[in-house]
Amino acid sequence: MDHRPQAWGRPRDDVYGAYDGSYLQSGGPKTATQSPVVTGTSVVAIKYKDGVVIAADNLASYGSLARFTDVKRLRVFLGTSVVGFGGDVSDMQWLDRHLNELAIDESYDDEPSPSSLLSASPNKGHGKLNAANLHVYLQKLMYRRRNDFDPLWNQLLIAGLDAAGKPHLSSVDLRGTAFTSPSLATGFGAALAQPIMRRHAPTEEAAAALTREEAVGVVQECMKVLYYRDARSLDRYSIAVVTKEGVELKEDEQLERQSWAFAERIKGYGTQTV
Amino acid sequence: MAAMFSQNPVMNGPNYSFSDSPQTNAPEGAREHRFDPYTDNGGSTLAIAGADFAILAGDTRLTSGYSINSRHHPKVFKIGGTTADQHDATLAISVVGFAADGEALKERLDAICKMYRYRHGKPMSVKACAQRLSTILYQKRFFPYYSHAILGGLDEEGKGAVYSYDPVGSYEREQCRAGGAAASLIMPFLDNQVNFKNQYVPGSGEGHALQERERNPLSRNEVEVLVKDAFDGAVERHIEVGDGLQMMIITQDGIEEVLLPLKKD
Amino acid sequence: MTSIGTGYDLANSIFSPDGRNFQVEYAVKAVENGGTSIGIRCKDGVVLAVEKVITSKLLKQGANKRIATVDRHLGVVYSGMIPDGRHFIDRARDEARSWRDTFKNPIPTADLASRMGGYMQAYTLYQSVRPFGITAIVGGWDSELESGVDGEVGRGPSVGAGGKTPGKKYGGPFLYMIEPSGLYWGYYGAATGKGRQAAKAELEKLDLSADGESSLTLEEAVKEAARIIYVAHDDNKDKDFELEMSWISGADGPTKGFHQEVPKALREEAERLAKKSLEDEDEEEEKKEDDKMEE
């Protein structure tokens, strides 16, 4: 997938030919059209033994302008799942409000689940919708919006547990395409982070052998590589670990141990002559 | 080819049909055509009907451009069973093309088959289901399910049945059919190996005098080997095919599912 | 009641000559027949409790909850006609949701009480409707934290408009009781239903101030609530009942600002203590009577 959300969903010239927009020039009132404006870049996530680690940086870009630098792109759902958002930030906010409503609806059923009676964490009390359920729900929502030609310009990663209590990681994009994998990354991350994560977790079995420390380490490494190479990224990021104990979310992390020494060796893009 | 993958900065950025800035004055109610609701998620499927069985197969790779989204995303589904695990299903469908449409199409047909089963107390016949699937596709003629569907089951006489479709509902019962990205690679192989096209009895003459090799139904084992060979070939030559091979073998005793590894490169 | 049967009790929206709306007063009667509900506001939270009268042995134990969550931080319990209460809850949920849609923030308890008070009052005005046959107790915790707007993406400005006044306290526990007339007040402790008199007498003995040395903690309040429901049940002794309790604490408390059912273990402990306290009282009385006899 193209790493720039602006390009998602666009017909390609080489496939469809240059677009003839002349028939649209009919002088009526201007209509606002869906296309991403303020965007977030990659979200990366990997499964491990007891859960899922997911991360996204805190930047919202306005084209090439680093517009907002403290944007939280990981959202907790019912204290049991995390949704990571790539793509349009206003659509992310819409979805966040929508999920918030859904969570309140869930809390009306006030019988706490057995797990919440055992543990001290109260947020999971209403956790009847798990991450796998949430994934299906969001897939239907996104697919419906694409059918209405009013897409939510996002790619989402959903991290949490399934009904059996096993780690769950899945993705949905603006067309309603949904899939799961031991590791996932949206946007630029699909090209830069996925190869790194797949080295550590090529299969479900390999992912199930990873420890929490290893998984966090891999994700941090991915965030670093993305910051090195993705011009629409930031060195402050959010990272969440989702397990059956709940969600541990840190929203203001700093990329550690950066080394830009490699940059000096890069040649061949600019005007340099040697 | 180069233009297709114009991420290369030398090429002055990717060439999409629209500039990034908002444009045009559209008449009221008109939607500007900017969003392309379709994409191709690659992959390939294949179905072969035998004397008393039918096999549907598909690879499990899900792609988007040069990226592999998932190495395990099944394309073949049991439908019309009465439980979540579809253990009593009698039909199977494979979908390839745009994955979200394929998923939606399969879910709709599954719901219809279930409803039929609850109402009539018996599973839907392949023939009826095949016609119904055509109707579903045709109803969305002007915003089609971008999907190449193949339906498999056993007909009223217990013979293997395979029905293949185009995205707008044109369909046909066939002995075998390949669909998806590597269809053009697999189909000629099938013509030769299943329908014995271009196979003649040795020494039977020359030109028009040549006698075609007699067609006889293949055994289940032969077909399974054929399917594996077809996919191994497709994996070698097509980048969007690989990772895993999923097979559904429909027999009188139910549907058996087999998962085999394919090359992951 | 002197004016009964004089025609002024046949419809809403008609006053009797001495200034009463009989329909409302009859609605209050409906409430007075219902199982006792109480609410306790203490320094670090709110407890709601209800005496759920068991009307049939065929009902599943612990099912058919009487305390409802209206928003994450809001709970409602009521005495009186249960279907009226259910509708009240539906409306309260709609109000809470529409507040969030408009202001992108959870509704303060006071505002919910105000809106629901207004709603109930409207049912005293028209011929075509009857008043609600319930008295509702609304408990909530308004967040003391700098709460993000729903869907907010960043921290927002650190200075300038929209900040809070330094030194002023925000949020905290709130408790309101709304009557069929639409009248509502904020309370430290509220009780309604059949056993309200006994319950109120017990509530008045508690130190419910927010800053007193001996003021009640949330956990103590849970135990008191259980005891009070048991005491109040004395008036209704021939019928079986289940105790249902919920609580709301602040972000640093056990429910993290959410309205939740009191955990089973704590509720059972509270019930054990409640029963013990009743038995002790009985024994004491017996002793007193024995002493008298000896004299």
Image (cartoon, coloured by chain):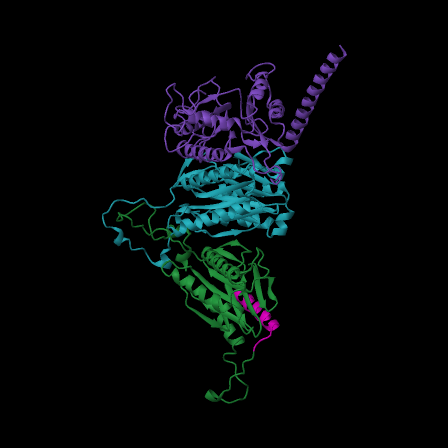
Chain colours: A cyan, B green, C purple
User: Number of marks in the image?
Assistant: 0
Residue B183 appears in the rendering: no
Name the residue nearer the viewer: C197 or C274.
C197
Using the rendered view, name the quadrant where residue A48 is placed: top right
Assign the magenta stretch its main secondary structure.
helix
Magenta highlight on residue B218: yes
**Is the C terminus of chain B in the top left, top right, bottom left or bottom right quadrant?**
bottom right
- From the top left corner, tell me how far across and down residue C51 is, in percent: 58, 29
Q: Which residue ends up furthest to the top in the rendered image? A: C295
Name the residue nearer the viewer: A157 or C62.
C62
Residue A128 appears in the rendering: yes
Residue at image position (42%, 61%) is B136
- From the top left corner, tell me how far across and down residue C231 is, in percent: 62, 23
Magenta highlight on residue A62: no
Name the residue nearer the viewer: C201 or B158.
C201
Residue at image position (48%, 65%) is B129
The range drawn in magenta is B217-234
Residue at image position (55%, 47%) is A132
- From the top left corner, tell me how far across and down residue A39 is, in percent: 42, 41
